[in-house]
Image (spheres, grey):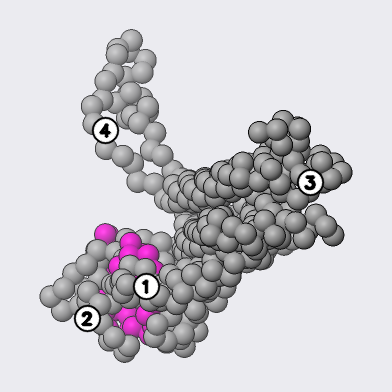
């Protein structure tokens, strides 16, 4: 009790020093909360954007043309001649998945898989009057596709189910529809590289928030794309998969590749550059934040040193009156902990207010990113970490000066 009273008197006697030290911790914690809330929010937004356009696992037929065999080589193979063919023409290959129905049935029975969506993708030309734009169409079962990518929340006009209610309907990306000046009910003609054409009616417009997708992609019923390409009902080129736990995607993709011998890409591999940038931002955030808190700790260390130097006679008198070294440590360490604890609390409040203010700042209008406000995540774990670090740093900063103060010889000090 006496230790606490003496510590309080010391703090109140040097109000400016106490306030400066406390503000150092406050701004260090506040900047930590603001930075980590914003950076984690950015990472979460980037991951959500990835998952809105990338399935957990994507299975497709990755065919590579073999140029090691040629007709000329087969013709001259028994004549002891060296045959060299320059710039051979690739042979026609089919990119479809063989035994697709059997694979789909097996995948739907897998307990680790929640949704399977087969589709047929092809390059097309969008023709509307004199305008012609190159892009892609995905022939899908729209209900399955919508549940994998949450397409309903990405629709700016119409609903995914509208594709089922319209004969030869099409759902277009917002950028593509704007370039063609198309709206609901307008007709657009699609032409494949093979030269076949078919007209479709616009029934919906979506905006994922990634320009390369919104400017080129459209969704059509799978049967319509098969008809447009002149293929049968079993012809599909890709399978999208959604897992119960998408963290299992890398191992599951390897398992599916071994089982079906088709290329299986997990979402982390497909977006490795984005994942790497997320890690870099996380490390940068923690490095800068811990640096700020450490600097605040050194500020407290310097102030405690100054306090002890100015209180040499007081310490000597206390020890002469019977205070032990442990009592002296408790007196000055309690001052440091007081500064750290209340500085951290004020930093938590300031950090929350700054983070909330940032979360209400409108994001600049951008056709490529569907974002209304700056992304900020309010995670209680960040505040708990900030509070603990805000107390531990001043504790360490005050411990060494306190120990040094406890070792002072009162006789030497009083003799001057």
| Relative height, residue 264 to residue 120 (above, below) | above
Q: Is residue 229 left or right of residue 323?
A: left
Comes first in the chain, label 2 or label 1: 2
Question: Are the residues tagged 4 and 1 within 8 Å (C-beta)?
Answer: no
Q: Nearer the viewer, mark 4 or mark 1?
A: 1
The alpha-carbon separation of the residues under discs 3 and 4 comes to 96 Å
Residue 345 image offset from top left, x and y in percent: 64, 65
Residue 44 image offset from top left, x and y in percent: 53, 62
Dot 1 lies on which element?
loop
Dot 2 lies on which element?
loop
User: Which residue, given by chain and number where applicable, does mark 2 sit on?
Assistant: 181
| Relative height, residue 81 to residue 204 (above, below) | above
Dot 4, how many residues are within 10 Å of its Cα: few (below 14), some (14-19), or many (20+)? few
Name the mark on residue 318.
3
Q: Nearer the viewer, mark 4 or mark 2?
A: 2
Name the mark on residue 108.
none
């Amino acid at each position: 009790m006496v230790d606490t009273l003496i510590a309080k008197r010391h703090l109140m006697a040097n109000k400016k020093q106490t306030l400066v030290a406390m503000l150092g911790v406050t701004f260090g914690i506040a900047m930590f909360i603001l930075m980590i809330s914003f950076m984690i929010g950015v990472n979460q937004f980037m991951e959500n954007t990835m998952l809105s356009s990338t399935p957990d696992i994507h299975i497709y037929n990755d065919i590579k043309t073999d140029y090691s065999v040629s007709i000329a080589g087969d013709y001259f193979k028994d004549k002891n001649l060296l045959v060299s063919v320059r710039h051979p023409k690739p042979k026609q290959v089919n990119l479809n998945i063989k035994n697709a129905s059997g694979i789909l049935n097996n995948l739907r029975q897998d307990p680790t898989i929640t949704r399977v969506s087969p589709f047929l993708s092809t390059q097309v030309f969008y023709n509307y009057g004199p305008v012609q734009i190159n892009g892609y169409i995905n022939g899908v079962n729209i209900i399955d596709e919508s549940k994998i990518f949450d397409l309903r929340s990405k629709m700016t006009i119409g609903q995914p189910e509208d594709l089922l209610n319209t004969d030869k309907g099409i759902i277009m990306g917002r950028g593509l529809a704007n370039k063609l000046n198309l709206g609901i009910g307008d007709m657009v003609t699609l032409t494949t590289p093979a030269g076949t054409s078919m007209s479709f009616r616009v029934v919906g417009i979506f905006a994922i928030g990634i320009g390369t997708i919104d400017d080129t992609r459209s969704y059509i019923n799978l049967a319509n794309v098969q008809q447009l390409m002149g293929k049968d009902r079993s012809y599909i080129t890709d399978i999208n998969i959604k897992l119960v736990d998408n963290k299992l995607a890398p191992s599951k993709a390897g398992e599916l590749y071994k089982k079906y011998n088709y290329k299986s890409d997990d979402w982390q591999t497909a977006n490795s550059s984005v994942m790497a940038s997320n890690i870099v931002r996380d490390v940068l955030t923690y490095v800068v934040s811990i640096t700020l808190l450490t600097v605040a700790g050194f500020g407290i260390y310097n102030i405690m040193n100054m306090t002890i130097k100015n209180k040499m006679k007081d310490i000597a008198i206390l020890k002469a009156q019977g205070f032990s070294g442990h009592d002296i440590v408790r007196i000055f360490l309690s001052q440091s902990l007081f500064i750290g604890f209340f500085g951290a609390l004020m930093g938590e409040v300031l950090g929350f207010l700054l983070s909330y203010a940032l979360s209400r700042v409108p994001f600049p209008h951008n056709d490529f990113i569907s974002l209304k406000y700056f992304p900020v995540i309010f995670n209680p774990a960040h505040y708990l970490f900030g509070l603990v670090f805000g107390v531990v740093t001043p504790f360490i900063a005050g411990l060494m000066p306190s120990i040094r103060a406890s070792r002072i010889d009162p006789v030497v000090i009083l003799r001057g």
